[in-house]
Image (cartoon, rainbow, N blue to C red):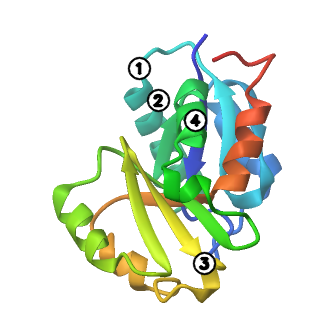
Amino acid sequence: MPQYIAFLRGINVGGHRVKMDRLREIFVELGLKDVSTFIASGNVLFSTDSDDADGVRVTVEDHLASQLGYEVPTFLRSPAELAATVAFCPPEIATQTEESSSHYVIFLDTSTPDSLRSDLAQMNSEIDHFYFAGTEMHWLIQGKLTESPLFDSGLDQATRGVRTTMRNMNTLRRIAAKTNPPWTT
């Protein structure tokens, strides 16, 4: 049975409050199995009978919109895909410590468009650096997220028109650890 982690955008930010019990119920209403949430920021683990990941994503997005009253962009990853995301480590990232830097992953629906790669390459600096791997962008920040000049709206402006959601690498490592048995990759 295929297993996925749904990374939802806009859960418990910007006035959109959803209790995790309710979020789990919404996924169960769709007939999804083994539904669990991880922290209150829109991370949902589940199993499904469907092999059509894109169809599952569309169904989840439609149901979330009907139940919550607003669009919730949804990014699905299998346990194996999440493991690859967590394992991605260019040398510049490998030499950083958690005390000196922050590592975020920005999820996209497809590979990073060339125009966005170009825009982000122009934003690379001593503080911010972007790396690309498939349908994810890795953002390494020297220091804390709030110390980046891109923190408030800079990154949102750069990604305009591209569906994204972002998670801290530490959160992703913890989710990946939860996908071990009874989940399998």
Quadrant location, the C terminus: top right
Contact check, label 3 and label 1, Cβ < 8 Å: no
**Which quadrant holds the N terminus?**
top right
Q: At 40% across and 76% down in the image, what residue appears?
A: 156
Query: Given contact means CB atoms under 8 Å apart, are the residues at marks 4 and 2 in contact?
Result: no
Q: Tell me if I can see residue 160 in this picture.
A: no
75 in relation to 181, above or below: below
Q: Is residue 106 left or right of residue 49?
A: left
- Disc 3/disc 2 C-alpha distance (Å): 26 Å
Task: Tell me the distance, in whole angstroms, between the alpha carbons under discs 4 and 3.
Answer: 26 Å
Residue that badge 1 annotates: 52
Q: Which residue is mark 3?
A: 14
Front residue of this view, candidates 72 and 6: 6
- Distance between mark 4 and mark 2 Cα atoms: 17 Å
Q: Amino acid at mark 4?
A: Leu
* Mark nearer the N terminus (4 vs 2): 2
Query: What's the distance in space between the residues labelled 3 and 1, CA to CA?
Result: 31 Å
Horizontal and vertical percent for residue 34?
Answer: 75, 24
Residue 167 place in picture, x, y as percent? 60, 58
Q: Gap between marks 4 and 1, in whole Å?
A: 18 Å
**SS at mark 4 in the image:** helix
Q: Which residue is mark 2?
A: 56
Q: Give the class, few, some or many, for how many residues have Cα within 10 Å of label 1's Cα (few <14, many ≥20).
A: few
> Which callout, 4 or 3, points at the residue further toward the start of the chain?
3
Q: How many marks?
A: 4
Q: Residue beneath label 4, please?
A: 82
Image position of 147 (left or right of 97): left
* Tags 3 and 2 touching, CB below 8 Å: no
The answer to whether residue 161 is above or below residue 148 is above
Amino acid type of disc 3? Gly
